[in-house]
Amino acid sequence: MKLIDTHNRTHNYLRISLTDKCNLNCTYCNPSGNSFYGIQNSALLSNEELLRLIKIFVVDFEFTKIRLTGGEPLARNNILDLLESIGKLKSTNPFELGITTNGTFLLDKLESLKGLGLDKLNISLDTLDRLKYKSITGADKIDEVFSSIHKAITLSFSPIKINTVIMKGVNDDEIIEMVTFAIEKNLNIRFIEFMPFQSNGWNDDNYINYEEIKKIVEKKYRLIPIHSHPSEVAKSYAIKGNGGTVSFISSISNHFCGDCNRLRITADGKLKLCLFSPKKNEISLKSLLRSAKYNDADIANVISDSILNKKLKHPEIDELLKLESNNMLQIGG
């Protein structure tokens, strides 16, 4: 059955955070001083529990898209074993499988990921400059990311999406350069508005909205709109006379809540109806999975009931800045 909320939005896209662990310390995601969220491995969902949940969403609720996130999902132990099991489920219940990664653990896994049925590959890269990369992420890992992108191209992953969070005074001077990089490599560059999360320093001085970013791109390149489904979060454009594409994700300035089709499962097994929903509204699927009282049908009923509590849109910025435990590492973006 379809999973439809009280605002008549059909949900068919699940994002799962596999771990809160990450080897980078990006300023917008994991502020300095919060090295790891600290979830013990025993508190994470096991591969078997994850597969059980995915099966419920795909079979019972007809979900067509699953995306694995983190933290850094490839930092999870036995990640390839999990993907092998998911691949077997895909063979009998087709759905699109994607992963969002920082690219630093990707290089030696790309061929396996391709063989295991990964459909969509998103790689985070906020700068092309080594020193700036180290400043943003806290690590000198840009060569690993470049090597992963190049190998993904040779393995014919398509489209390869590059996620770039733009911060005024940090990397907004590279917007044209990032588009040129996408053209040269035939990539999809996705400019993402800097979003306010717990203690990540968001303010009006370092925030730049998508319209400003788009105007900078259009100073050099002519953008041609690409039609997409209303539930798509990105506004995408072809680049006249060139390969590659440009997308803008306007989570703050022009939210897309009205057509939202996404649900999230946190690294510690909680269902989030919205990226910005408060912790008190999360539902622990892990406790249901680990209770002998709940079979798959019972868990499906809990999920079905919970969707009726989903709000029409996320809170305003001043409320977002006050949210507790609103950390991207655990939520998974």
Image: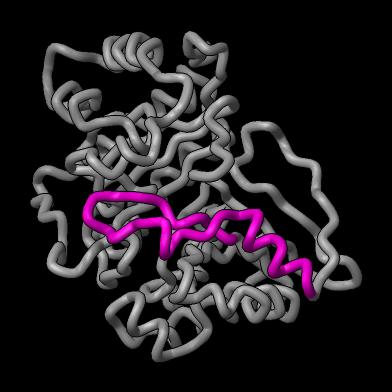
User: Residue 34 falls in which quadrant of the image?
Assistant: bottom left
Rendered residue at 82%/60% (across/down) = 223
Q: Position of residue 244 (x, y in %)?
A: 75, 68
Q: Would you say residue 93 is visible in this rendering?
A: no
Q: Nearer the viewer, residue 119 or 196?
A: 196
Rendered residue at 57%/25% (across/down) = 258
Rendered residue at 48%/13% (across/down) = 5
- Compared to residue 50, the image places residue 290 above or below, namely above
Furthest toward the front, the residue is 205
Rendered residue at 68%/48% (across/down) = 235
Q: Position of residue 260 (x, y in %)?
A: 54, 29
The magenta span reads: 191-219
- Compared to residue 47, the image places residue 133 above or below, namely below
Q: Is 211 placed left or right of 265 in the picture?
A: right
Q: Is 64 placed left or right of 87 in the picture?
A: right
Q: Position of residue 99 (x, y in %)?
A: 47, 54
Q: Would you say residue 277 is visible in this rendering?
A: yes
Answer whether residue 204 is magenta in the image.
yes
- Compared to residue 29, the image places residue 107 above or below, namely below
Answer whether residue 34 is magenta in the image.
no
Q: How many marks?
A: 0
Furthest toward the right, the residue is 241
Q: Nearer the viewer, residue 56 or 311?
A: 311
User: Residue 300 falls in which quadrant of the image?
Assistant: top left
Q: Position of residue 134 (x, y in %)?
A: 34, 84
Q: How is the image coloured?
A: one colour
- Compared to residue 228, the image places residue 133 above or below, namely below
